[in-house]
Image: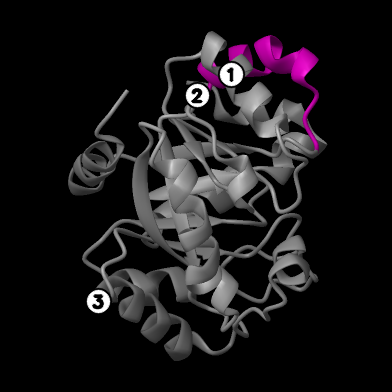
Amino acid sequence: MKNIYQSILKSASTKEKLLAVLIDPDKFSIEKTKDFITKVHASIITHVFVGGSTVEEGVTNVLVAAIRKETKLPIILFPGDVTQITNHADALLFLSLISGRNPDYLIGKHVESISKLRNTSLEVLPTGYILIESGKNTAVENVTATLPIPKNHTQKIVDTAKAGELLGMKLIYLEAGSGAKEAVSKTIISAVKKELQIPLIVGGGIRNRQQLENAYNFGANMVVIGTAFEEDETFFDDLKK
């Protein structure tokens, strides 16, 4: 499967709601892959994201290969490190943590990844990644040694997103973080969306259908949900086609 980005652009232009399930290899049992993907197929989920902040080398490759056998949905890597790159996926979010100032996560890891990317057919999606305060210390903060932007600094979040777009990012990702107590607010989503000409992804802290619809209604083109499924797979029942 190719042209992932063009597909996302088309969906944004037609206001189609995209939903990605985020599978963290550290928290997922490969033995339940088939059953889990069966539930995904019965839901409104359109994309599968795979990745985590801390994953042992090789684990992502095995998991993505197993998922690939069970689905034709686009599989997109959401890597916390270059060791999570695998050619079994369709695309890679080339995440630049533009909310922080750690050079490793602004450009360093990207340079490190090139030797691996040269030998893959992955579609690379340059993505401006913005971590927003959510009421909980997140794995992203700990791993990247960066702080989220305070949730009441809306203009700074908007300006950061716009700077990412002007730098050439093809996607902007507003992230509350895994296990966030609070989802990204409608005020932030709406303000950022008004400034952007590129698709907007929102993730973190979304645990019910109403929060999902709120994110869409205020401007998210794609929503990413992970922890809600990890904690309670009956959430799939609320997302049936």
Query: Is residue 40 within the magenta segment?
Result: yes
Distance between mark 2 and mark 1 Cα atoms: 6 Å
**In this view of the protein, can residue 185 be seen by the observer?**
no
For mark 3, what is the residue? 166
For mark 2, what is the residue? 88
User: Under tag 1, what secondary structure?
Assistant: helix
Residue found 30% across the figure and 36% down from its top: 4
- Nearer the observer: mark 2 or 3; the answer is 2
Question: Tag on residue 65?
Answer: 1
Residue found 48% across the figure and 60% down from its top: 110
Neighbours of disc 3 within 10 Å: few (<14), some (14-19), many (20+): few
Marks 2,1: beta carbons within 8 A: yes
Of marks 2 and 3, which one's residue comes earlier in the chain?
2
Marks 2,3: beta carbons within 8 A: no
Residue found 77% across the figure and 36% down from its top: 230
Distance between mark 3 and mark 1 Cα atoms: 35 Å
Q: Could you say where residue 96 lies in the image, as x and y percent from the top left?
A: 47, 66
Q: Is 174 on the left or on the right of 57, as rendered? A: left
Quadrant placement of the N terminus: top left
Which of 237/122 is in front? 122
User: Under tag 2, what secondary structure?
Assistant: loop
Of marks 3 and 1, which one's residue comes earlier in the chain?
1
Which of 74/91 is in front? 91
Of marks 2 and 1, which one's residue comes earlier in the chain?
1
